[in-house]
Image: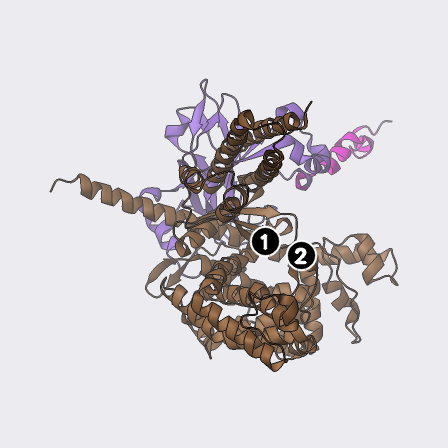
Chain colours: A purple, B brown
Amino acid sequence: MPILTRHEILDRLDQTDLRKKLLVSPLLDRKRQVSLNSIDVRLGTDFIVIQQTNLTCVDPAHGKEFEQNLGRYQERVQLSFGEPFILHPGQLVLGCTLEFIGLPEGVCGQILGRSSWGRLGLISATAPFIASGFRGVVTLELENLGQIPVVVYPGYMIAQLVLQETSGVTPYEGKYSSPTTVEYAKLSAVDPKEEIDFWSNSESFGRAETDPET
Amino acid sequence: MRARDELLEQVIVLRGQVLGISARIRELRFPSGAPVSLVDLIERLVRKVAGTVEGEAANASLDNRQFDRRLRFAIRGLERLAAHLRFAERAAAPQVQPGSVRTLVRVAEELFPGSRFIFRPQWTFNYSQRELVSTYRGMFVDNDFGLLREDEYAEIVTLSSIRAQDGFYVFGFPRVEKDSVLCHVALGHELGHKYAEEFLENPLAGQFLGHVIKQAADTTGRTGDNPLVEDESELGDAGSAGEILCSRALQETIADLTGLHLFGFAALAYTARIGLLNELDEAQRIPATEHYPPWRFRLRTMIRAVPQHWFEQFLQLGQFPENPKALVVMSWKKLLDIVEPQSDVEGLQRAPKLRIAYEGLEQLMEAAVDFLNNELGAKGISIDSIPGMAHWRLVEALLLGFPPDRYEAEDGEKIATVCGILNAGWIARSLQIQAYLLRPSIAQLINNHISDRDIQEAIANTPKLDPESLYFKESCYEKLVLGLEPEQYTCDDTNAPQEVLSCLSEHITKEWISKSLIAAEDEADVDTRAKFLNDDGLLAKLELQQRLTEKALEYSDLWHWWSQAKMRKVAGKQDADPN
């Protein structure tokens, strides 16, 4: 599917019908932020830092229990503009875009890192796909792959939103409904328990079929 | 150990504790600089007061009882200062919504330049305001002990980046409302108390007030030149009435009208919301709010103050489409229905002192409204601007799941004002509740912008309900949103089970459901009912709208900051350009 170009992005940003509009708010510096094939997005002020000392592991099979104790495992940090956030080597934190993004139906997107940051070792999205119809601020998985700490500040243009048209139109059915701040994984919605049960159950594995001799 | 030594030790310990706690508070993040200024002020006062009494102790004779009393008084002052550190601590970023607080502080500072403001949550369910510069002056300067001289106090205040003449205000809001950003329109009312105080300090207002009370006293056979300063016991009801008039009736009414000037429909909707949560006709309730005007009275006074036909203008300027317009009109008519009965006035008439006070209020209102119009008019705020505060595009943004921070107008894109955002929030909320009360499917139709015919059909097919029961159900919703226990609701019509269910929320515990609402129902059915409510999700929608409104306020603050920064940048370049 084609990637939207600057001209097409601007057309969609200027659409007055909110249901068809590509909404990126606040687009503080439209001239600088809308580039040839993407929109540069800024780092927001909210972060989630995982408290490693309180957590032995994350087991999606026990997602509900994890979420019930989320307060113990995560620290929410809110910075002011101009305040630094130091990302140490190997550290993963969750940040979010400053902009609230609304993708119209028929347009999906990907959040990708910007090369200048990438060369410092900072990657800003490990799960970059955004479904069409999504509304909300986008959670960024920030990780420093380099060997020296990297300082980021809220407001920095840290990632880029690449937009693509979809071949058909389907309403958004994601589990992250209009988030206005950074959100931790909804592990209970992942719910792989059923699958784990299936795979660990020898009967359901279809022994009868695979071993007809017995 | 001698008694005095013990007292001196208490002073030293208190000083150490205050300075220790304040150092920790400084490490917190705040949405504005005011909390740190308060910490500064408290630290300086503590050091100065403690240092003063320590110095005096060295020279005071042991049998000087007056000095011991002075020492105890100082300790009480230090204890109060220590307790006030909580105002700063509670104003830190995790305790409040920084974006909306910054925006509201900006509104307050534009209204009262030079004054400083703190917003902090409090446990009591009340919005409150207090001014600290005069409070501390009363504690340490203007009293028999005079622990500090006026010049010393003035120096401390100035060094803490506070302008004594403009004041330092602490606004409290109920902690339970922390995430209810729409309720922050109460700020307009609280700021109004500052105007009310100014009005009452005005000599002309004082004379007029005296005259009104004298009139009332004469008609009831009492005498007295100025009932406000004379011995109240001699004046009986008239004297008490004067106090009520000054302390509550006039203060609250002026404050309400200020809120109306600042936030328009949002202030009305908020007042109605709180009124419905309380008793509409009672003037006296719990001791803390004794003699507050009845909520019905307050609402009526606000509605009377808005210009005629403002509501029609409001809908025209906002270019509301027909269907949502029908629901907003319905919401407005409900407000008018609430204020129509005179049951509140009848209640006031029955208590002699309240009757005198509220009759006096009628006479004073004209002067108060003129005063307010002059004060706010000088800042470019007029009651005539209320209709222009809301814009349909902002409401539409909220209904579609976007923050209402900007909109397309005929002459290009506009950044929404704080008023515009809060009004959009209240209108979207009213729409949702009205639609939901009529029939849940209508809310869905509105959200999805499905054809006009469908909505008209849905409205036409909805059975008509008694307006009083609609108020009641709305108040049930409000109680649930606040996490309070709803009252028992019964309905005779055939839709009763569903109507009762519509008053429930996911916040309701099973215990509440079984105890107060569906006691006679099968316990096993509770889960099914709770699931039905969660699936229906009105409260989830209202919560989402709160979050989006909050986000819009944050963005509004950001846009403001961005444009200011750009202006400074341009100005800097111009300054630097020698040509």
Residue B397 picture location, percent across and down: 49, 59
Q: Secondary structure at mark 2?
A: helix
- Give whichever of discs 1 and 2 has the lower sequence position: 1
Q: Residue furthest top?
A: A147
Left or right of B413 in this view: B194: right
Looking at this view, is B453 or B560 the one in front? B560
Looking at this view, is B145 or A11 the one in front? B145
Residue B521 picture location, percent across and down: 87, 62
What segment is highlighted magenta in the picture? A189-212
- In the figure, B45 relative to B515: above or below? above
Left or right of B423 in this view: B61: right
Question: Disc 1 residue type?
Answer: Ser
Question: Disc 2 residue type?
Answer: Val
Q: Is residue A197 magenta?
A: yes
Task: Give the residue displayed 23% in from the left and 45% down from the top.
Answer: B571
Residue B186 is drawn in which quadrant? bottom right
Left or right of B267 in this view: B558: left
- In the figure, B554 relative to A207: above or below? below
Dot 2 corresponds to which residue? B481
